[in-house]
């Protein structure tokens, strides 16, 4: 049960670790640190369960969920996902890529989950392990004091302030990027910017048989679509679009989403009898990262360090991975253990590798050259198996993907050059309007009502 702030401005709470953010990264790292015996407090600005997107899990996330002790609970709320359907109106067909055909086929499936349910499972697990959860509380500022504990100023939803005193601070605030907002150093990708419009629907046509739970990814002229089925029969549907298209919106968001669906026949056919549940949502979806992810007695995990794009469903996977590695870093720091430097180097190397691996694919995913390669049947020099490994979440160098991925990139640039004009024009359409803010929204969980 969540703690509530006392109504006094002079009161402070002391702890070993203060985690800002109760999403997947914050829940995971706090649970692991509590297991190690540390006094951990988590601040979450909202209250669980809360709406969020990022509902498609990756196969290689399942061992991490098992490590956290929540896999059986996630299985109960999820629908099994064996692969990804890629739909190309430009080729007039679709392909289903199965995780079982990856270089490492040990993780042949994952789950689609409603994030409100999934995130609550994770935070409840942390509380059950001894984490102190404070919901409806926003971190405002940190005063780092070298050689001493650090002071974190917070405020609850009624405006009541409270100070926390902690030996270590973990920023798991997601796209709020709490520490970067205070310390600076966050840089937007100058070549990648987009915005998502999305909602939950009932009545969306599903793939047949065993493929019912697979995610569908559909290209169209203004970006790409996701179609993610849930166990209860509802479906998450959304479009990630370029700024030049989003800026044309003159109608309410629900109508804009409906009009955008009509522009993509494969999606429109799946949604011929669909009904929007509740409201439509929108969110800025720009890519960013920070140069550094740690400092004296602080660490950034998940989207607090870097955000790419949801096309390969990498957000939760990268968040869990950084949280699990980060727990060892924090533990070693608090114990003044000699392996602290090694843990930190491994944390930084692995997190950066994961972000780098996904970034290249995400930034090239909508290019004609990429579409042509992706829709080609057959595999040469294990390139397809390596890409499937990345799609399954094997993005940290654990399987021998390096050479086939390098060969795929060479093939991509050759195809790009062969159709240079078409690919260059597509790139220009994608980046047009990137410097401009296409929506004032900062978080997926915030509804856009106008």
Image: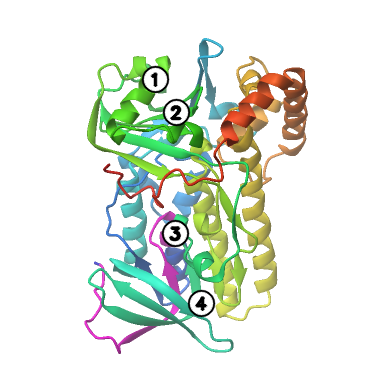
- Which quadrant of the structure image shows residue 30? bottom left
Q: Rounded to the nearest whole Å, what is the CA distance between mark 3 and mark 1?
A: 32 Å
Residue located beneath label 3 in the image: 176
In the drawing, does residue 410 fall left or right of residue 110?
right
Residue at x-position 30% and y-position 60%: 46
Residue located beneath label 2 in the image: 225
Q: Rounded to the nearest whole Å, what is the CA distance between mark 3 and mark 2?
A: 25 Å
Instruction: Work out whether residue 285 or residue 107 is closer to the camera in this orientation and state it.
Output: 285
Describe the colour scheme in one phrase.
Answer: rainbow
The picture places residue 135, in percent across and down from the top left corner, at: 29, 66
Q: Rounded to the nearest whole Å, what is the CA distance between mark 1 and mark 2?
A: 8 Å
Q: Please state the extent of the stretch shown in magenta in the rendering.
A: 2-28
What is the secondary structure assignment of the residue under circle 2? strand
What is the secondary structure assignment of the residue under circle 4? strand
The picture places residue 151, in percent across and down from the top left corner, at: 45, 83
The picture places residue 68, in percent across and down from the top left corner, at: 44, 56
Is residue 425 part of the magenta span, yes or no? no
Q: Are marks 2 and 4 in contact (CB under 8 Å)?
A: no
Q: Residues within 10 Å of mark 2 (few under 14, many from 20)?
A: many
| Pointer 4 or 1: first along the chain | 4
Is residue 21 part of the magenta span, yes or no? yes
What is the secondary structure assignment of the residue under circle 1? helix
Residue 267 - label: 1
Count the marks: 4
Quarter of the image with the N terminus in it: bottom left
Vertical placement of residue 316 versus 128, above or below:
above
Q: Rounded to the nearest whole Å, what is the CA distance between mark 4 and mark 1?
A: 47 Å
| Pointer 1 or 2: first along the chain | 2
Q: Are marks 4 and 1 in contact (CB under 8 Å)?
A: no
Q: Nearer the viewer, mark 4 or mark 1?
A: 1
Residue located beneath label 4 in the image: 168
Res. 325 visible in picture: yes
């Amino acid at each position: 049960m969540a703690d509530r702030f006392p109504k006094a401005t002079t009161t402070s709470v002391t702890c070993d670790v203060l985690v800002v953010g109760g999403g997947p990264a914050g829940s995971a790292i706090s649970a692991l640190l509590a297991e190690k015996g540390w006094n951990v407090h988590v601040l979450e600005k909202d209250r669980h369960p809360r709406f969020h997107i990022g509902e498609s899990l990756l196969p290689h996330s399942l061992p991490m969920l098992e490590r956290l002790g929540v896999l059986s609970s996630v299985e109960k709320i999820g629908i099994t996902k064996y692969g990804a359907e890629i739909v190309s109106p430009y080729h007039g067909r679709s392909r289903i890529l199965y995780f079982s055909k990856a270089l490492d086929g040990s993780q042949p499936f994952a789950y689609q989950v409603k994030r409100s349910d999934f995130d609550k499972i994770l935070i409840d697990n942390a509380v059950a392990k001894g984490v102190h959860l404070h919901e409806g509380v926003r971190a405002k500022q940190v005063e780092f004091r070298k050689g001493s504990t650090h002071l974190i100023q917070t405020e609850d939803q009624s405006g009541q302030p409270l100070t926390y005193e902690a030996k270590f601070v973990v920023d798991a605030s997601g796209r709020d990027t709490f520490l970067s907002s205070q310390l600076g150093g966050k840089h937007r990708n100058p070549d990648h910017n987009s915005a998502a419009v999305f909602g939950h629907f009932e009545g969306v046509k599903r793939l047949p048989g065993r493929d019912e739970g697979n995610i569908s990814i559909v290209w169209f002229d203004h970006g790409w679509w996701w179609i993610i089925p849930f166990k209860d029969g509802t479906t998450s549907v959304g479009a990630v679009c370029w700024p030049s298209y989003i800026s044309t919106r003159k109608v309410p968001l629900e109508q804009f989403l409906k009009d955008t669906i009509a522009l993509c026949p494969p999606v429109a056919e799946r949604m011929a009898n669909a009904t929007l549940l509740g409201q439509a949502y929108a969110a800025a979806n720009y890519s960013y990262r920070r140069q550094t992810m740690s400092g004296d007695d602080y660490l950034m995990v998940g989207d607090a360090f870097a955000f790419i794009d949801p096309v390969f469903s990498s957000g939760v996977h990268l968040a869990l991975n950084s949280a699990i590695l980060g727990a060892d870093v924090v533990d070693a720091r608090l114990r003044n253990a000699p392996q602290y430097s090694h843990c930190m180097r491994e944390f930084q190397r692995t997190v950066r590798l994961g972000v780098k691996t996904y970034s290249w694919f995400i930034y090239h995913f909508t290019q004609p050259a990429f579409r042509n390669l992706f829709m080609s049947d057959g595999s040469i020099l294990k390139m397809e198996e390596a890409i499937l490994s990345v799609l399954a979440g094997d993005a940290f160098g654990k399987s021998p993907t390096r050479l086939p991925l390098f060969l795929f990139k060479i093939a991509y640039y050759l195809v790009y050059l062969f159709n240079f004009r078409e690919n260059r024009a597509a790139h220009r359409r994608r980046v047009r309007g990137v410097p401009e803010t296409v929506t004032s929204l900062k978080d997926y969980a915030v509804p856009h009502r106008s």
